[in-house]
Image (tube, rainbow, N blue to C red):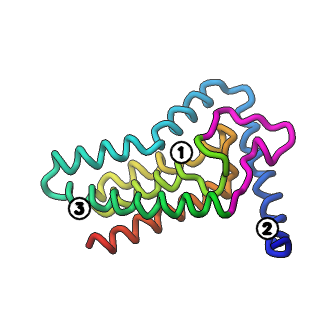
Amino acid sequence: MKRTLQWLQPLHRIDTRLFLWLNRVMTDRRSLHYLALALSHSGSGVPYAVIGLLCLWLEPLHGQAFATTLACGYAIERSLYWLLKNSIRRRRPGEAIAGWQMRIVPSDRFSFPSGHTSGAFLFLYAIGLHYPALYPWLMPRAIAVGCSRVLLGVHFPGDIVAGSVMGTVCAWLACLWVS
């Protein structure tokens, strides 16, 4: 096991340096903190469920397919998220970096992958398939949700990259299953 993790050490060092560099932006910018907090809360999962249910109820053309894609996608994503978090067990920046204080209390203990980011990218991909005109408008939001997690000090950038890939793949798998 130790040899397997040794090759990850250079990646972890780069990830930590990038995390610290990105967080220097936050030091004196209180308004950026509040924006990051709002974006993070918007990626909590509840808004996705509400939007899916509203589309199911109000949108006759694509609503059922969209809501089904979301439900299947999140069933896959949450299962994979739980499995990866609890098997990889990457420590969050507050535990991994001496003297680092996270700006919020995360909902779970481990860092890899970012569940907020995977959820945001799953939602983005599902929107892109069922409502393509909205896709370009929501892409910056999905990216911003991931960035907010780094700026709040609870994820490394690598966690965000993994979450974005995971969410996209989960949505793609759900679309294959629903189609």
Q: CA distance from mark 3 to mark 1?
A: 26 Å
Which residue is identified by label 2?
Answer: 8
Q: Position of residue 89 (x, y in %)?
A: 70, 57
Q: Amino acid at mark 1?
A: Ala
Give the vertical position of 30 relative to 149 (above or below). above
Q: Amino acid at mark 2?
A: Leu
Neighbor class of circle 3 (other Cα within 10 Å; few <14, some 14-19, many 20+) is many
Q: What label does residue 144 carry, if any? A: 1
Which residue is identified by label 3?
Answer: 65
CB atoms at circles 2 and 1 under 8 Å apart? Answer: no
- Give the structural element (helix, strand or loop) at label 2: loop
* Left or right, 177 with reference to 102: left
Q: Which residues are magenta?
A: 88-106
Q: Position of residue 169 (x, y in %)?
A: 47, 68
Quarter residue 177 falls in: bottom left
Q: CA distance from mark 2 to mark 3?
A: 40 Å
Q: Amino acid at mark 3?
A: Ala
Q: Nearer the viewer, mark 2 or mark 1?
A: 2
Inspect the magenta stretch and tell me whether residue 53 lies in it.
Answer: no
Closer to us: 86 or 5: 86
Q: Nearer the viewer, mark 3 or mark 1?
A: 3
Which residue is rendered at x = 52% and y = 64% of the image? 80
| Magenta span dominant secondary structure | loop
CB atoms at circles 3 and 1 under 8 Å apart? Answer: no
Which residue is rendered at x = 54% and y = 59% of the image? 81
Closer to us: 50 or 17: 50
Inspect the magenta stretch and tell me whether residue 105 lies in it.
Answer: yes
Give the vertical position of 80 relative to 150 (above or below). below
Badge 3 or badge 1: first in the primary sequence: 3
